[in-house]
Image: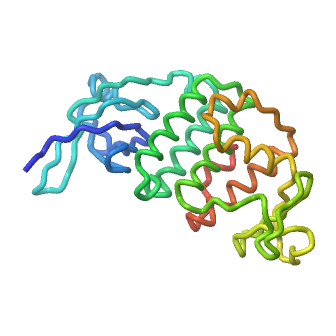
């Protein structure tokens, strides 16, 4: 029985345990979320390699008797030092990581989840402060696709009429559906204007770095943020605290 395994991995979170060891959570392209121990003190080479938002090739030893895992080695290919240099980048990256952890790595779509996370974190590594929120909204919108909860934002869920290009739709978190102005009811609903809907449709086929080419006004960005957060929160059954800083 094999005990050593190799993964394409992204470090999401670290937690200390014992006197000088840490427990790491990774997103892998092969098995989704993976938890493994990192042994060694502050001067350990391995400890410096396994750090949040580093990605590369991970070697893990699995003890089948104890059903425990420990990191044997980590060949870091992308370090992303820029994430730690700006508060907005760090907060946005934390929001991405916590969303992945809260949704169990995207279910079974591990390769798609891994590729999306790497793409967004690469963009955040050099992003300006004002752009960080857009990358999180991009991630949440693409993540909704991976989770299978992305709605059609071009039609009303009641009358099935296709919305005009300049029309406002309303999203009900209670019913998890979009309504036109004729069909919307009195329960609290989020406004999704033409600018937000157009931007969300345009970014569906783009990589994260390409967002810089598409303009978005402040009001539409706020609508897109509220909509995507509410959408993912409904899928998770909870609101994540890390979203508050975005």
Count of numbered tags? 0
Residue drawn at x 75%, y 58% as measured from the top left: 153
Colour mode?
rainbow
Residue 12 vertical placement versus 121 (above, below): below
Q: Nearer the viewer, residue 133 or 180?
A: 180
Q: Nearer the viewer, residue 209 or 153?
A: 153
Q: Position of residue 131 (x, y in %)?
A: 72, 31
Residue drawn at x 56%, y 44% as measured from the top left: 96
The C terminus, quarter of image: top right
Residue 35 vertical placement versus 206 (above, below): below
Residue drawn at x 68%, y 55% as measured from the top left: 229
Q: Position of residue 214 (x, y in %)?
A: 77, 32
Taking 238 as reference, is 173 left or right?
Answer: right
Corner quadrant of residue 134? top right
Taking 119 as reference, is 229 left or right?
Answer: right
Taking 29 as reference, is 183 left or right?
Answer: right
Q: Position of residue 242 (x, y in %)?
A: 61, 48
Q: Position of residue 39 (x, y in %)?
A: 23, 36
Residue drawn at x 35%, y 25% as measured from the top left: 76
């Amino acid at each position: 029985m094999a005990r050593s395994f190799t993964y394409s991995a992204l470090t999401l979170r670290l937690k200390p345990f014992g006197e000088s060891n840490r427990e790491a959570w990774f997103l892998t392209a092969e098995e989704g979320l993976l938890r493994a121990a990192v042994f060694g003190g502050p001067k350990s080479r391995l400890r410096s390699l396994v750090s949040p938002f580093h990605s590369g090739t991970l070697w893990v030893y699995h003890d089948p008797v104890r059903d425990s895992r420990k990191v044997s080695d980590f060949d870091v290919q992308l370090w992303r030092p820029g994430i730690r240099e700006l508060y907005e980048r760090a907060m946005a990256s934390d929001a991405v990581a916590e969303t992945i952890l809260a949704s169990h790595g995207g279910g079974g779509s591990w390769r798609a989840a891994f590729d999306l996370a790497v793409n967004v974190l690469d963009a955040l590594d050099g992003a300006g402060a004002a752009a960080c929120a857009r990358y999180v909204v991009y991630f949440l919108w693409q993540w909704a696709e991976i989770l299978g909860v992305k709605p059609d934002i071009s039609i009303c869920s009641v009358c099935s009429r296709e919305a005009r290009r300049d029309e406002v739709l309303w999203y009900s978190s209670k019913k998890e559906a979009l309504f036109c102005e004729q069909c919307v009811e009195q329960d609290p609903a989020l406004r999704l204007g033409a600018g937000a809907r157009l931007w969300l449709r345009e970014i569906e086929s783009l990589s994260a770095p390409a967002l810089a080419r598409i303009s978005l006004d402040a009001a539409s960005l706020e609508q897109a943020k509220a909509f995507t957060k509410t959408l993912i929160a409904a899928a998770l059954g909870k609101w994540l605290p890390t979203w508050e800083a975005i």
